[in-house]
């Protein structure tokens, strides 16, 4: 199997890289092995071996030397090695990141068990920090990548009438860079973990355990995944649209994917640059962040948040698009204020890069920066507010179809509203100084990302599950999952606002007795929230294996992906789609059918 070969060649590559380094070190009179440096040098060789083994050589690189690329496998096997079909890649992304979501969720259950009462129960202080850090980066990785990686890859080309992504080989490469990221994070935990959380602030990240090096290498690789994916989506949406698919006829999820990809392409380099500087400080004795040698730890915070606040919108913009898709089709109404929503998304792209320093009001940065960043952060609530009002306008007086995707989409509106309103307090300097690094921030962040993006993820997953698998999911299990998750989520994070206002710090393994009752209630609620994923997992596995066959268009939706079979044929369309109207022409008198499929082109006949 290709994955086994990938592991073997990764070990060979790592051994080769570290062997060459070790030989050089011995010749200089140094020890053969230096953990930080050996991992830094050996990892790129291991990564190349992995990519060659899983199919990069057989299906891509052989053509560089005049050979013929191998034929990609069919059936289930195609999901376990290099494949350039965007639909296969979408499923690969989806399964991988759902697995990471569940694993990171288990880490959250461990965290909540530890915090059920004061004192140390399950972990030591260092172990708690490692588990907390793994949970953070695991969930952030899921939130950043799953909407674009899974649903973007699967449905965007079909929605715009394309036969595939613009760069299929790059698309396959971007996915197969993901498993090494997860593997490195797991190895880092086995090596003792890292204790900086997902932010990796120096000077701690320069001085702590070697697990930090593996974290840095993994996240740098993940940044490359984001950049390659962003480029591919941008080029695909600009150049691969079918005849008649004008910018004004793009489904709103495509606009969300386009806007998120712009941010991923322009801003991801910031985080990667910061992590590379940390690596250099560790292995090359540079002094980017050594204050005593002229460096500045605050420099890292600026570089980090210059990416990491826009990254919130890499997560949320495709989520906005997916939710609005569900709301329109399941309200049987045209998307309200479509052009305003598109403008709002592009406005968020523009503003997202100039609001980063509201995360740093307590960092010691110059006071004269406080007011500008306060104002800019408040400004970004305007385009997000427009999207919220468009969602309300879409469902207003609609014929709501209260199936599982619709429930998650409506929950998104509620949760993201709470996240947005509580974000105002963290954008304003006086209240942020009081609330910074408390559980108020934890609650706000989770309402924005989990309550927003992750609820949107499940709206999208249930909505497109029939299209991606050709099977119907179990509606009863879906609704049990929703209600347990929605109620459990509120019971977990609403009390965190209160305990945060009362001064409980985040990222701590122990706390004063005064917070014991709050944390006991939060932890019990957390286990209710966690139990919802048992029903989700059972539903997905059972439905995919033995669910009823899905119709081509079970939701009676009007966008292009629902006009082909479930799952779609290999090249998406038997012919060339010709787009004749907008995607949401519900109740519009005389509106033509959204598209018709023209004669097959020579390339895909």
Image (spheres, rainbow, N blue to C red):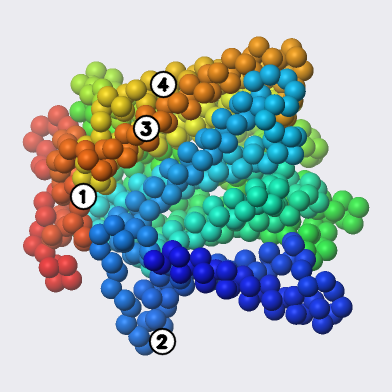
Element class at badge 4: helix
- Tag 1 and tag 2, C-beta contact below 8 Å: no
**Label 3: element kind:** helix
Picture layout, residue 170 above or below residue 144: below
Q: Residue at x 70, y 79 (%)?
A: 20
C-alpha span from label 1 to label 2:
36 Å
Query: What residue is drawn where x is 31% and y is 61%?
Result: 77
Mark 4 — residue? Answer: 484
Dot 2 falls on a residue whose secondary structure is helix
| Distance of label 1 from label 4 (alpha carbons) | 30 Å
Q: Nearer the viewer, residue 428 or 109?
A: 109
10 Å crowding of disc 3: few (<14), some (14-19), many (20+): some
For discs 3 and 2, the disc positioned in front in the rendered view: 3
Which residue is identified by label 1? 567
User: Which residue shows up at 43% across the image and 49% down it?
Assistant: 96
Residue ID for mark 3: 536
Mark 4 to mark 3 CA distance (whole Å): 10 Å
Tell me the tag on residue 65. Answer: 2
As drawn, is 454 to the left or to the right of 27? left
Query: Marks 3/1: CA distance?
Result: 21 Å
């Amino acid at each position: 199997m290709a994955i086994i070969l990938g592991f073997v060649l990764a070990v060979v590559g790592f051994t080769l890289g570290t062997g060459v380094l070790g030989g050089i070190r011995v010749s200089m009179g140094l020890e053969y092995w230096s953990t930080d440096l050996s991992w830094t040098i050996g990892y790129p060789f291991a990564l190349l071996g992995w990519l060659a083994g899983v199919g990069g050589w057989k299906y891509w690189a052989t053509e560089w030397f005049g050979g013929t690329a191998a034929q990609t496998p069919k059936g289930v096997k195609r999901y376990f090695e290099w494949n350039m079909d965007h639909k296969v890649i979408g499923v690969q992304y989806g399964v991988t990141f759902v697995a990471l979501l569940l694993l990171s969720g288990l880490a959250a259950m461990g965290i909540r068990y530890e915090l059920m009462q004061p004192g140390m129960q399950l972990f030591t202080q260092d172990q708690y920090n490692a588990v907390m850090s793994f949970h953070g980066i695991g969930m952030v990785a899921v939130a950043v990548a799953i909407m674009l990686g899974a649903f973007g890859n699967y449905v965007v080309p079909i929605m715009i009438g394309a036969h595939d992504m613009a760069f299929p080989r790059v698309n396959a490469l971007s996915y197969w860079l993901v498993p090494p990221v997860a593997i490195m994070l797991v190895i880092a935990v086995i090596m003792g973990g890292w204790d900086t959380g997902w932010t990796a602030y120096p000077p701690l990240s320069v001085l702590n355990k070697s697990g930090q090096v593996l974290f840095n290498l993994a996240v740098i690789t993940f940044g490359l995944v984001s950049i390659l994916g962003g480029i591919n989506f941008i080029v695909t949406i600009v150049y691969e649209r079918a005849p008649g698919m004008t910018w004004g006829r793009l489904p709103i999820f495509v606009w969300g994917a386009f806007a998120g990809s712009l941010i991923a392409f322009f801003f991801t380099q910031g985080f990667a640059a910061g992590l590379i500087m940390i690596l250099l400080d560790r292995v090359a004795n540079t002094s980017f962040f050594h204050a005593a040698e002229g460096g500045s730890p605050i420099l890292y915070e600026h570089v980090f948040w210059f990416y990491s606040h826009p990254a919130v919108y890499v997560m949320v913009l495709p989520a906005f698009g997916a939710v609005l898709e569900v709301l329109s089709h399941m309200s049987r109404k045209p998307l309200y204020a479509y052009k305003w929503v598109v403008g709002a998304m592009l406005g968020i792209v523009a503003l997202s890069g100039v609001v980063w320093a509201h995360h740093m009001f307590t960092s010691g940065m110059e006071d004269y920066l406080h007011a500008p960043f306060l104002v800019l952060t408040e400004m970004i609530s305007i385009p997000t507010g427009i999207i919220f009002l468009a969602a309300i306008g879409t469902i207003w007086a609609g014929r709501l179809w209260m199936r599982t995707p619709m429930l998650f989409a409506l929950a998104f509106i509620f949760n993201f509203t709470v996240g947005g309103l509580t974000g105002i307090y963290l954008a304003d300097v006086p209240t942020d100084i009081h609330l910074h690094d408390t559980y108020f921030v934890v609650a706000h962040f989770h309402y924005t990302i989990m309550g927003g993006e992750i609820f949107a993820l499940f709206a999208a997953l249930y909505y497109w599950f029939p299209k991606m698998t050709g099977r119907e999911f179990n509606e009863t299990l879906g609704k049990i999952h929703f209600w347990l998750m929605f109620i459990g989520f509120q019971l977990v994070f609403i009390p965190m606002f209160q305990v945060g206002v009362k001064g409980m710090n985040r990222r701590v393994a122990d706390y004063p007795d005064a917070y014991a009752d709050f944390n006991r209630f939060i932890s019990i609620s957390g286990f209710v929230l966690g139990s919802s994923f048992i029903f989700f997992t059972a539903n997905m596995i059972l439905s995919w294996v033995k669910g009823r066959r899905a119709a081509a268009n079970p939701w009676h939706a009007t966008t292009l992906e629902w006009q082909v079979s479930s799952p779609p044929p290999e090249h998406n369309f038997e012919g060339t789609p010709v787009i004749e109207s907008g995607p949401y022409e519900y109740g519009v008198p005389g509106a033509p059918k959204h598209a018709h499929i023209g004669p097959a082109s020579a390339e895909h006949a």
